[in-house]
Amino acid sequence: QPIKLNTTTLYNPDFNYQMYLTPGLITVGLQMALVVASVLILNLEFRRNTIDELLQISTSSSQIVVGKMLAHLCISWILFVLVAYVVFPVYELGKPKTDFNFFLIYTLMSLACIGIGMMLSAISNNLLFVTDVALFFTSPAFVFSGFTFPRWAMPWYDQFYADIMPYTHFLDGFIKLYFMELPLSYATPEIFKLLVFIGITFPLSIVFFQRKVNQYLKENRI
């Protein structure tokens, strides 16, 4: 052979399936949990007849949405601590140098997932419907995100579906920041895309929920 190739395997040179699979399964599970929990945030107030108590605190949908978002974000941070400082060390996956970058992109994914869930919750009061939509939306994330199969080899409609899931962009950034241990600047495109999710879903949640509140107050006055 006229050309001799010397290859080196980076990031997972031992082809350790535990190192490859565990972070992906945990993070995709967190995405599903965050979205499914978030679809119950707003419409459950009407279902449990606690909306009057909520409106006594504030009739501003923006304050309600932000308050509930912060509460769920705190829960997601607790999950991050469990993953980064309990689960990963148990499986010998801990990388202390990447903790801040991992926390940052995880927080953006959490906000994007909460935003999607709250938007669905603000649009419909049908708990079964929004839960089904959330499960249908998040279940294929592990496959369509490109974790097990390259997205460039997928049909265009599958690539489009992958692009509208926040986990896809989180995964791209997570691979750069966690596995490759690159500086945060390398994940700028993924951070921007997650910010777009946040910037779209929360304003829509506020608008739709305010319409519900206004309609509810109007009916009660009558």
Image (cartoon, rainbow, N blue to C red):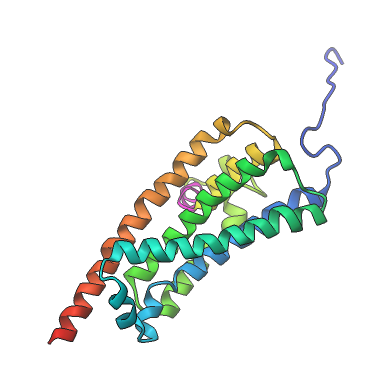
Horizontal relation, residue 86 to residue 135: left or right? right
Span colored in magenta: 157-165
**212 displayed left or right of 23:** left
In the picture shown, does residue 206 fall above or below 24? below
Q: Residue visible at 46% across and 48% down?
A: 160
Find residue 54 and report its horizontal and vertical position in percent: 33, 77
Q: Does residue 65 show up magenta in the picture? A: no
- Figure check: 85 above or below 42: above
Q: Quadrant of residue 102?
A: top right
Q: Residue furthest front?
A: 57
Residue 175 vertical position relative to residue 32 in the rendered view, above or below = above
Residue visible at 59% across and 42% down in the picture? 172
Q: Is residue 170 left or right of residue 39?
A: right
Closer to the camera, 164 or 187? 187
Q: Quadrant of the N terminus?
A: top right
Q: Main secondary structure of the magenta part?
A: helix
Estimate the x, y position of residue 38 in percent, counting from the top left: 47, 67
Hey, which quadrant is residue 82 in on the image?
bottom right
Q: Is residue 139 visible?
A: no
